[in-house]
Amino acid sequence: MRQDLYQHHDYYMIDDLLTPEHKVIRESIRDYVKTKLTPIIEDYAQRADFPKHIVRELGELGAFGPSLPAEYGCGGLDEISYGIIMQELERCDSGVRSTASVQGSLVMYPIYKYGSEEQRRKYLPKLAKGELFGCFGLTEPNHGSNPAGMETNFKDMGDHYLLNGAKMWISNSPLANIAVVWAKNEAGKIRGLIVERGMEGFSTPTTHGKWSLRASITGELVFNNVKVPKENLLPNVEGIKGPLGCLSTARYGIAWGAIGAALDCYDTALRYAKERIQFGKPIAGFQLQQKKLAEMITEITKAQLMVWRLGVLKNEGKATAAQISMAKRNSCEMALNVARESRQILGGMGITGEYPIMRHLMNLETVITYEGTHDIHLLITGQDITGINAFS
């Protein structure tokens, strides 16, 4: 088992901008990661296995929907607290953060934001505790970056809806108790439905052969004449703005989370460079290695400042979807570059499971693609600053 020697890196003293509560939350999550997750995560990733027991543990920690209201069994925390939790979890592994991010931002958030009061009371407390596990169905085999073209559909059969179609690349799906599924009604309008495991015609095949997010479980959602009770329709949203609102919430968490992966890579590379002796001295004493390390902490610091400011805006209700896109794209690109440079500092050791870098590197290749690809986020910023839609 690998010992977690991580030391906090805060070059611009951003901790001064955090509240005492923020720091207590960070230490709580960090302690859990160091004692319970880091020692086991490499083994699970090597075996491409998901540590199922962490679902209940994350629920007990308050990592599911932490910024949703306490009256539904959630944390009632602010958005910076949510970001800090995501960062600490992804410092361990992107798949662990994804587990929490999907549960909180893509399952609990739409039920809270778009659901009925009855749906909130029924699902949110159990999802918050990890007693129920959820997933989010939007991406389809033929529709990724263009979710509005979805083919999954449902028909009104009088006393129920009849759901048909398929979703793919769905985190958590093979183990999920419920799925928040986006589908078109007979009028072609996108609506959200809560689909429960056990409904006839509903299956969740597992996706095998991944080289990335190997400690996270991924699958499909297949709907073959699934009868969905009418009370499972999310009543308070219609159109693509529904799922996109959920994605903005998830992307905000990723913007924080990817920095955690970068910090872990940087911390590993810095420690290794100080200890690795070549040509009679630590390689940290050579100019090219110092250049790599100095550039890494510079880019990490810039990203830390960006997400802190985004968190303030989100707390004030001012953060726009385009601002969130910019931060998600920046953090992911930065983290991937830091992981690659860190791997080079470690040389051949960087590809082994003795160190976390190659696992982070592979994971980040997925994180930079999901929840809106690197290029799509660039076009979102482009549209926002020019007023011209480049998508069509």
Image (tube, grey):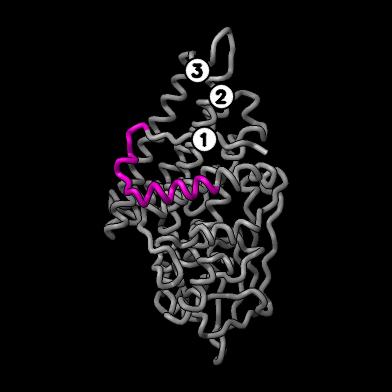
Ranked by sequence position, the earlier of labels 3 and 2 is: 2
Q: Look at 61% across and 60% down and name the residue there.
A: 172
Residue 284 is marked as: 3
Quarter of the picture holding the N terminus: top right
Residue 182 placement (x, y as % from top left): 51, 70
Residue 291 placement (x, y as % from top left): 44, 20
Mark 1 neighbour class, 10 Å CA radius: few under 14, some 14 to 19, many 20 or more: some
- The residue beneath circle 2 is 272
- Are the residues at dot 3 and dot 1 in contact (C-beta closer than 8 Å)? no
Amino acid on which the number 2 mark rests in the picture: Tyr
- The residue beneath circle 1 is 6
* Residue 187, above or below 373: below
Ranked by sequence position, the earlier of labels 3 and 1 is: 1
Left or right, 376 with respect to 389, comes to right
Ranked by sequence position, the earlier of labels 2 and 1 is: 1
What distance separates the C-alpha of mark 3 from that of mark 2? Answer: 8 Å
Task: State which region is magenta.
Answer: 11-32
Amino acid on which the number 3 mark rests in the picture: Ala
Q: Nearer the viewer, residue 52 or 351?
A: 52
Q: Is residue 92 visible?
A: yes
Residue furthest top in the image: 280
Q: Look at 40% across and 74% down and name the residue there.
A: 237
Residue furthest bottom in the image: 158
